């Protein structure tokens, strides 16, 4: 099965965990030619690399500019001026001092305490969305419900006008289309156009906020830019990253969390009886079906991992999704245990690039499932086969048609 590791196949999207299990059992990591990297699947190895300060996201400092250009061409990741400036360069894809500076400037808006103040806004929006859906016999949990939420919440946090949130969502989806294994020319053109439009929108919004600051993230970032801590491109890149990183991931984990609760009926019942159990159950949703299961690192130094020596310059794939099911770390790792504790899952990564939005992601899940479990007494699948997205970088249902029973 390891030889047949094809993340774009239907077999993989139906059940990546069967493949992950084979990868973990192998004596050595496998080399994944399509991405020119060694895939790490065991919890210990993934955690070791994610927390190692000699493991970096950007190839700068390892490859020459000429090699970098050649790599970009090989990956069809070139001739995209806007994408190159503000997507291929970002807080996520920087390291060391640049990364620390960019992260520090927005960190204060993402602490547990800061995001707690967003709860009433999330609650009110979700309750409004459900008013119509409760009148319907059935709905698609993804398109009709989950897909509306993160664009609204993150748009609000940044300070975008409410009426622009659907467009922010569209751009985020178009730009990230290009991140998986399949970098076709069509996707490339869509991603570049969306990046250009998104860029000019944010530059314009920034100008408006300069004239009339508000209590939002963009106004706060403008102050930093004025003091010279940000360039215009860094400013725009960080806003885009926050939207892109938080949008699809939130939709996907809401979808897989709901899917899991539908077949884990006993857990659903217990959670409805005692909503204080939700935060622990939500951690298990993140462990069980992490929506962003794969990231990469480049080695700045020689390293020994999963029983083998690797030279400086090696690229590793960190399979957070596989690490989260490693039986060496989690008992009954393939079971959803809503009361699992402790639960040191890697859904948000670890180390310097630990998810900036992890408190917000958990807050969204808590508020949304609290409302769903309070307002509905049951959920049923309309079609037992739930199609999941293809690819290695994302995990979540494409469609989740459900029948729900309001209380
Ligand atoms: C919904 C579930 C989410 C999951 C599972 C998730 C997962 C992750 C992971 C695994 C990383 C680390 C990448 C690496 O190791 O290279 C990451 C980084 C990041 N995430 Fe999230 N994320 C989620 C939601 C969000 C939200 C809601 C936001 C913001 C609104 C966000 C913003 C970011 C940013 C800015 C980074 C880059 C951090 C850095 O490089 O220092 N994420 N996320």
Image (cartoon, grey):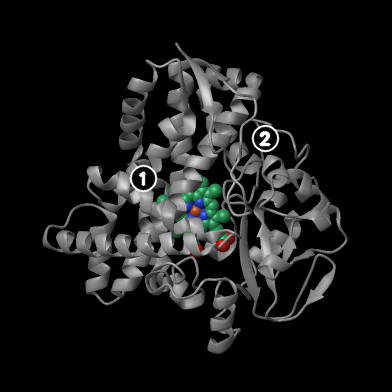
Q: Is residue 244 visible?
A: yes
Q: Secondary structure at mark 2?
A: loop
Which of the 4 image quarters holds residue 181?
bottom right
The CA distance from mark 2 to mark 1 is 30 Å
Which of the 4 image quarters holds residue 89?
bottom left
In contact (CB < 8 Å): disc 2 and disc 1: no
Q: How many marks?
A: 2
Q: Nearer the viewer, residue 2 or 292?
A: 2
Dot 2 alpha-carbon crowd within 10 angstroms: few under 14, some 14 to 19, many 20 or more = some
Q: Nearer the viewer, residue 54 or 210?
A: 210
Expressed as whole percent of the image width and height from the top left, the position of residue 94 reads 49, 72
Seen in the image, is 305 located left or right of residue 393? right
Expressed as whole percent of the image width and height from the top left, the position of residue 128 reads 31, 26
Which residue, given by chain and number where applicable, does mark 2 sit on? 340
**Residue projecting furthest to the top:** 407
Earlier-in-chain disc, 2 versus 1? 1
Asked if the residue at label 1 sits under 8 Å from ligand 1, the reply is: no
Q: Secondary structure at mark 1?
A: helix
Asked if the residue at label 2 sits under 8 Å from ligand 1, the reply is: no
The residue located at (70%, 81%) in the rendering is: 312
The residue located at (36%, 30%) in the rendering is: 126
Dot 1 alpha-carbon crowd within 10 angstroms: few under 14, some 14 to 19, many 20 or more = many
Q: Nearer the viewer, residue 333 or 292?
A: 292
**Residue projecting furthest to the left:** 211
Rendered image: mark on residue 346: none
Which residue, given by chain and number where applicable, does mark 1 sit on? 151
Q: Is residue 354 visible?
A: no
């Amino acid at each position: 099965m390891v030889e047949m590791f094809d993340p774009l196949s239907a077999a993989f999207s139906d059940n990546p965990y069967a493949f992950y299990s084979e990868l973990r059992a192998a004596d050595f990591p496998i080399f994944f030619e399509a991405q020119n990297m060694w895939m790490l699947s065991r919890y210990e190895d993934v955690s070791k690399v994610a927390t190692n300060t000699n493991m970096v996201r950007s190839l700068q400092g390892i490859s020459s500019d000429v090699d970098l250009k050649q790599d970009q061409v090989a990956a069809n990741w070139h001739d995209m001026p806007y994408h190159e400036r503000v997507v291929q360069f970002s807080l996520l894809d920087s390291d060391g001092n640049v990364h620390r500076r960019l992260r520090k400037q927005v960190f204060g808006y993402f602490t547990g305490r800061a995001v707690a103040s967003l709860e009433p806004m999330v609650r009110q929006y979700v309750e409004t969305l459900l008013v119509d859906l409760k009148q319907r016999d059935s709905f698609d949990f993804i398109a009709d419900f989950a897909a509306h939420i993160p664009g609204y919440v993150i748009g609000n946090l940044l300070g975008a006008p409410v009426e622009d949130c659907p467009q922010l969502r569209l751009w985020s989806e178009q730009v990230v289309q290009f991140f998986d294994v399949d970098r076709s020319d069509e996707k490339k053109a869509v991603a570049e156009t969306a990046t250009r439009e998104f860029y000019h929108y944010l530059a314009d919004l920034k100008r408006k906020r300069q004239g009339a600051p508000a209590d939002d993230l963009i106004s706060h970032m403008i102050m930093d830019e004025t003091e010279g801590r940000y360039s215009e491109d860094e400013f725009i890149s960080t806003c885009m990253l926050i939207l892109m990183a938080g949008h699809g991931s939130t939709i996907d984990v809401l979808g897989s969390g709901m899917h899991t609760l539908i077949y884990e009926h006993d857990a659903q019942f217990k959670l409805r009886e005692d909503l204080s159990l939700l935060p622990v159950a939500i951690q298990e949703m993140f462990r069980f079906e992490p929506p962003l299961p794969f990231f990469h690192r480049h080695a700045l130094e020689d390293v020994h991992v999963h029983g083998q020596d690797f030279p400086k310059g090696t690229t590793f794939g960190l399979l957070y999704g596989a690490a989260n099911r490693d039986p060496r770390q989690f008992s009954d790792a393939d079971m959803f245990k809503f009361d699992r504790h402790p639960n040191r899952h890697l859904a948000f990564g670890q180390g310097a690039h630990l998810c900036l939005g992890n408190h917000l992601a958990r807050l969204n899940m808590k508020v949304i499932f609290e409302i769903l479990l309070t307002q509905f007494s049951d959920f049923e699948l309309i079609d037992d086969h739930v199609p999941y997205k293809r690819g290695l970088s994302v995990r979540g249902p494409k469609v989740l048609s459900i029948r729900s029973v309001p209380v």
